[in-house]
Each structure stands twice: as C-alpha cells, then as structure tokens.
Image (cartoon, rainbow, N blue to C red):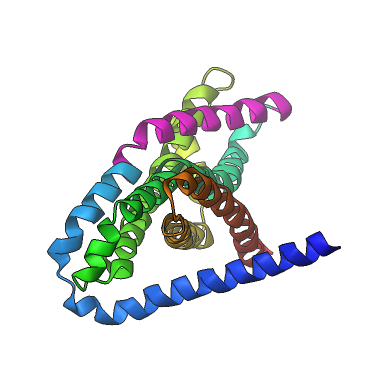
C-alpha cells in the first residue's frame, strides 16, 4: 500500500514537473522574434539529417518487409479470387493508418530520441548549457524548439516514404503468389484512401513530432552527474514509447470510433 502511495506521488510530481517544462517552452516562444534564424538553422539541418535522411535505410528495409508480410498473410489466409477488391483496404488499414506512423515513430525514438537526450545531458555536464544561459540565451528556445521543428518535418516525410515503400514492397511480393495488374492495385489503393486517412497521418506526424523531442529534451536536462546520463536516456526512450502507445490508441479511437 505504501509503495502504491509513493509511486502515485512520484508520478504526480513527474507530471507536474514536466508540465512546468512544457510551459517554459511555450513562454519562450514569446521571445522568438529576438532569435535569429541563422542561430538555429544549423541545429535544424543537423537534426533533420540525422532523424530523417540517416534513418532512410532502416525505414525502407522495415517497410519492404512489413508490406510483403501483410500481402503474404493476406494471400495465404484469404481466397485468391477477388483479392484485388480488398487488398487496397487491407494495406490502408494496417499500414497507412496504424503500423506506418507508429513503427516510424518507434524508430525515431530509438535512434533520434535517445541521441537527443544523450546529447543534451552531455552538454549540461560539460557546462555548455550553463555557458549559453550566462550569455543570456534562452536554452529552451535555442535547444528544444529547433529540434521540434526538425522532428515534425522528418517524421512526416518518413511516414510518407514508409507507406509508399510498404505498398510497393507489398505489390512486388504479391506477384509471386497472386497476379494483380498494377493499374488495378493502384486504383484499389486510391479508392481505399479517404480524407480521414490523410488527416490522421498529418495529425500523428504533428503529435509525434512534438512529443518525441519534447520528452527526450526534458529527460536530457535531468541528469546531475555523468553517472545519471544513461539512466535518464533509458527513461526518455521507455517513457516516450509508452506515451506513444497511449496517444496512438487515443487517436485511433477518436478518428475511427
């Protein structure tokens, strides 16, 4: 009982502290007009390159395998006659709505989220963040804000590439089991897509792009010694993934139920 009370209090204090961190970022945006774009340009470019471009090989590889797996399971477990009639709906429901955005977010958290937390924690221990503060630079605006913009752009691009690659991979794999003319396959995908599917991709990109760098930056500022850096980097990844699971379920419920 005492353990539950202490755990509840710890969670409540953590939520309160994170809320203050988010408010500090929002308040920092009021002074964005004083921040020169050139000063954050390099951070945005480097973060976009690492989060987006450098992640392309793993994104494409996983998307090809996932798209192929979905088609193989469909062709083995459903009748082959008339498969072209529901293959578009199947890919849109499984890939575009759920697995595409979520798997992409998981990869971004594993690669970029952990790197963000480790980088900020190291900068803090090396007194680099303190030096910025002594020069009068708002570290919330200078460090967190460009990473949020870069992650939103990168994760939206990666989701689109993931979906297209999974569709292409699924079609190529399907040719080995059942022949579906390319025109019919493309038309089935177009017919299966709705405005709601496009909207949910944009919404998830925005929410994931904001949550991932914000949570990881929050834990990056937490360590007080070099020994605590791996501890808080691990917490950043695990708790970001947990929150993404919850958010993904909520978005699906709100949009489709």
Q: Is residue 144 above or below residue 76?
A: below
Q: Nearer the viewer, residue 198 or 136?
A: 136
Residue 181 visible in image: no
Residue 57 magenta-highlighted: yes
**Quarter the N terminus occupies:** bottom right
Residue 37 higher or lower than 28, as above or below: above
* Residues rendered magenta in the picture: 52-79
Q: How many numbered discs? A: 0
Q: Position of residue 249 (x, y in %)?
A: 65, 57
- Who is closer to the viewer here, 108 or 203? 108
Q: Residue at x 45, y 72 (%)?
A: 22
Instruction: Give me the residue at 54% from left, 25% from top.
Output: 174
Q: Is residue 141 left or right of residue 34?
A: right
Q: Residue at x 46, y 59 (%)?
A: 222
Placement of the C terminus among the 4 image quadrants: bottom right
Apparent side of residue 233 relative to residue 13 in the rendered image (left or right): left
Residue 16: image location, x then y, percent: 57, 74
- 53 over 204 or under it: above or below: above
Q: Position of residue 87 (x, y in %)?
A: 59, 38
Q: Nearer the viewer, residue 53 or 118?
A: 118
């Amino acid at each position: 009982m005492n353990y539950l009370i202490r755990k509840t209090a710890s969670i409540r204090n953590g939520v309160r502290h994170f809320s203050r961190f988010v408010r500090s970022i929002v308040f920092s945006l009021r002074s964005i007009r004083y921040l020169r774009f050139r000063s954050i340009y390099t951070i945005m470019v480097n973060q976009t390159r690492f989060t987006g471009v450098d992640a392309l090989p793993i994104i494409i590889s996983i998307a090809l395998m996932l798209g192929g797996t979905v088609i193989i399971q469909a062709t083995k477990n459903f009748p082959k006659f008339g498969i072209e009639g529901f293959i578009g709906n199947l890919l849109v429901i499984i890939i575009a709505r759920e697995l595409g955005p979520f798997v992409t977010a998981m990869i971004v958290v594993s690669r970029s989220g952990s790197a963000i937390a480790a980088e900020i924690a190291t900068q803090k221990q090396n007194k680099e963040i303190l030096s910025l503060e002594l020069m009068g630079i708002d570290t919330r605006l200078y460090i967190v804000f460009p990473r949020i913009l870069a992650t939103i752009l990168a994760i939206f691009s990666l989701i689109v590439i993931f979906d297209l690659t999974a569709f292409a991979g699924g079609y190529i794999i399907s040719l080995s089991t059942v022949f579906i003319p390319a025109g019919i396959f493309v038309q089935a995908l177009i017919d299966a897509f709705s405005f709601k599917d496009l909207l949910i991709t944009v919404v998830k990109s925005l929410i994931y792009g904001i949550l991932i760098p914000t949570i990881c930056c929050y834990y990056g500022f937490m360590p007080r010694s070099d020994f605590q850096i791996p501890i808080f980097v691990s917490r950043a990844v695990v708790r970001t993934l947990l929150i993404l699971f919850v958010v993904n379920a909520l978005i699906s419920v709100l949009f489709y139920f």
